[in-house]
Amino acid sequence: MPRPEYVMFQRLLSTQQTKRKDHLGFLRALPTMIVFLLTIWTLGCSSSGETIDRPSNLPEEMVPVRTDISITNLTSLNSPRDDFGLTMSLDTSLVFYTSGRIEARGLHSIFWSRSTARGWLAPQLAVEVNNAESNGIPSITPGGQIMFFTGCTYGFGDCDLYRVASGLRGSVAEETTAWTIPRNLGLRLNGPYWDSQPSIAADGSMVVFSSDRPGGFGGRDIWISLREQDGSWGHPINAGRSVNTVFDEVTPWITPDCRTLYFASNGHPGLGEFDLYFVVLDPESGFSPVTSARNLGKPINSHNNDIAFSLSSDGFRAFFSSNRSGGLGGYDIYQLSEAPIAIDPLNIVHGVVTDSKGNPLFAEIEVTDLRTGNIIGRFQTEPETGEYALVLRRGGNYAITGEAPDYLFNSQQVSTPIDLPTNRYDTLHHVLQPRKGWVRLLLFFNTGSNRLERESTVDLDRLTLFLKANPDIRVEIGGHTENTDSPQANRQLSLERAEAVKSYLVGNRIVAERIDVKGYGDTRPIVDDDTEEGQSMNRRVEMRVVE
């Protein structure tokens, strides 16, 4: 006979619907019914009629105890009902979380709060995100402009994964965050099953979630989906037997450095019904676990249910939820005095996108791996300020590109050393020119060479797409050099580099007659050539729209 709190926990996290909302309900449920019948048949044909027992609790002498960590109930965010699944922005001023408080529209809804000098503001309902059904377990990108969450209506199954982005606020009060219409993440991630509890990586490269879809180890499993080269989501991969059991693994959370996966489970030996665990991931092998699941121990875990571990985007602040005694009621959110496991140093980028007059732009931000050409993540700027925040893993070479309707794109390079000792902070300013303007292309040549390096393909492919989308546009490709050689040699090298760009575009089916090439040599410097940095800025290739 299951414990009462376990029954409530299942209702809390699975939100199974008592009836289907449309006439296709039977067809949607059919695959699950088939899997269930096959499972019953398999068990009936096995040589043993025994059921699988849940693992015993850990003996007290084997329970890890963290005397260096204390926990605090966040009473200003909690209520007499369930509160869980907190996610925090990079600047630590904004949180979203799930609550069953009386203002909720459904069984659970998503609420938000901002930090002030006097503490957290009274939690407010995220109006545009919620409906009359259950919504919850939000996970936001570092800047707080994009949220992934669980919605339990109008999807492909009982619960689906959704994405929502911040929109222009208009008349909405300044301290709030308005949202666009939520979008289902599609059939690659969702299906006629229970797909829930997403955690988006801080760099946008992966999403992890819990699902009871076929192909797992039983119950609810943790699944991982990586970004494809074109920026779409790949087919989910089961996190494996180091993480998953024949019972339930839920509320996963990926650390900002993508090296550690936290989750809750009632299938590994623990202290209570659900405990919190972690595994170490290997980024070089598709983020597969390289350790067995390890219990986080006391005081994080208790003899009650402990779920929904999360970290702020910088990895310094840690939270979890528990229905242990001493709370305000149901599940409460607790903050740890420090993160239980230190993360790798990060490259934190703060940027702004403006037009040529300095006006902020509501823009899309795309992060691309310059070594592979793969899109790592997609973000957007704050609508009113044009600002954004990113977290990049060390050891990478990235292109950060800002794009907005009716403007040309602007890409900038950020390289993060593999031996980065502490967090590094970069500031970028993307100035977007109008579509009839010009843009400096992010290209790479060896010294004195006209041969395009592989890293150049990121911006060249972006320019190719721009020209294909605008077949009436004619452009000039202009090469420029620093003044370290003779004027004649500089002019010749700059022309050869411009011609190399044209050859790439023509090779990708852009009509040659649409492309003029010019070699300006060192005649049009944009800064003084007295320093290596100045020479690097003058050594460039620009694209200018001429018609």
Image (spheres, grey):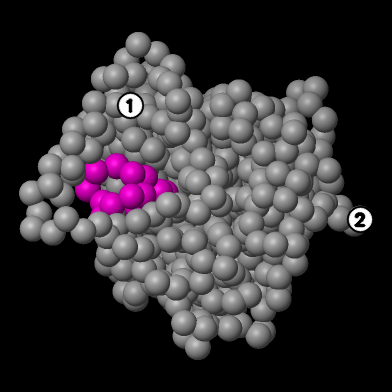
Q: Secondary structure at mark 2?
A: loop
User: What type is the residue that disc 1 sits on?
Assistant: Lys
Q: Which mark is residue 468?
A: 1
The residue nearer to you, when weighing 446 against 133, is 133
In x, y percent, where is residue 158? 41, 31
Outermost residue to the top: 23
In x, y percent, where is residue 302? 59, 69
Q: Quadrant of residue 106?
A: top right
- The residue pinned by badge 2 equals 118
Q: Is residue 533 above or below residue 69?
A: above
Q: Which residues are magenta?
A: 209-228
The residue nearer to you, when weighing 22 against 51, is 51
In x, y percent, where is residue 349? 60, 59
Q: Is residue 260 left or right of residue 452?
A: right
Q: Secondary structure at mark 1?
A: helix
**Residue displayed at 71% across by 70% down:** 71
Do the CB atoms of the residues marked 1 and 2 lie less than 8 Å apart?
A: no
Q: Is residue 322 visible?
A: yes
Q: Is residue 407 left or right of residue 185?
A: right
In x, y percent, where is residue 429? 64, 50
**Residue displayed at 15% across by 40% down:** 38
**Residue displayed at 76% across by 23% down:** 170
The residue nearer to you, when weighing 125 against 460, is 125
Outermost residue to the bottom: 61
- Based on the picture, tell me whether residue 382 belongs to the magenta stretch: no
Q: Is residue 496 visible?
A: no
Q: Which mark's residue is nearer the viewer, 1 or 2?
A: 2
Which of the two labelled residues, at mark 1 and mark 2, occupies the earlier sequence position?
2
